[in-house]
Image (cartoon, rainbow, N blue to C red):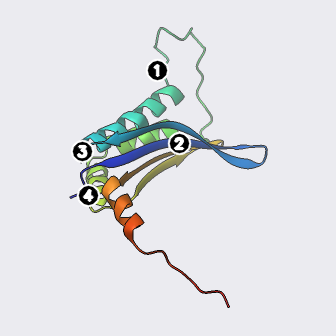
Amino acid sequence: MHDEFLCHVTAYGMCGGRRIGVPLGTYRAPTLALALWWLRDRASWIAERLDPSPHDAAFPAGALVPVADTVADVPALLRAWCADDAGQERVAEELAGGRLVRVAASDDTTEYELLAESVDALRMQRTLPALVVPVA
């Protein structure tokens, strides 16, 4: 069983013709349950900022307008991922097995990526001998 997990959230977009990543948070989770909780919390945090409630008093009436139906609904995708119990169980199994987990959702301008991996698996990878290929 892997006991500690490194979690990252990053937003990627294009700037000057190059793909640029903007870190939105990192967390070193001491347990699998906390890693899953943090990923769900960050997904919800992104969804709320991309799609706040129009009834929120912080926004004047008419300040928020819906996007076209042709635009991917990243907030809905992230909220659905958070609510998917079977999907959460699959993520837990992958992480417990020492595998990297990547959850991504994108619209026409930005990709939002949530990553998690076992710290133990990272340490084990560092102890493996490097692949050396002789050059003639």
Residue 31, located in which quarter of the rendered image?
top left
| Residue annotated with mark 2 | 10
The amino acid beneath tag 3 is: Thr
Q: Residues within 10 Å of mark 4 (few under 14, many from 20)?
A: some
Q: Which mark is residue 31?
A: 3
For the C terminus, the image quarter is: bottom right
Mark 3 vs 2: CB contact within 8 A: no
Q: Position of residue 131 (x, y in %)?
A: 50, 78
- Earlier in the chain: of badge 3 and badge 2, it is 2
> Mark 2 and 1 residues: CB-CB less than 8 Å, in contact?
no
Question: Which sits earlier in the primary sequence, circle 3 or circle 4?
Answer: 3
Q: State the CA–CA distance, disc 3 to disc 4.
A: 10 Å
Residue 74, x across and y down, in percent: 51, 40
Secondary element under disc 2, as helix, strand or loop, is strand
Label 1 secondary element: loop
* Distance in Å between CA atoms under marks 3 and 2: 21 Å
State the SS at label 3: loop
Judge whether 25 appears above or below 17 on screen. Answer: above
Residue type highlighted by circle 2: Thr
Question: Residue at image x 39%, y 39%?
Answer: 27
| Quarter occupied by the N terminus | bottom left
Q: Tell me which label, 2 or 1, sits earlier in the chain.
A: 2
Image coordinates for residue 50, horizontal then vertical, percent: 53, 30
Task: Look at mark 1 in the image and give the residue it sits on.
Answer: 53
> Which tag, 3 or 1, sits closer to the chain's start?
3
Residue at (37%, 45%) from the top-left corner?
81
Residue under the image location 43 percent in, 41 percent down: 78
For this view, does 5 lie left or right of residue 42? Answer: left
Q: Quick one: label 3, few (<14), some, or many (20+) residues within 10 Å?
A: some
Q: Looking at the rendering, which quadrant does residue 61 occupy?
A: top right
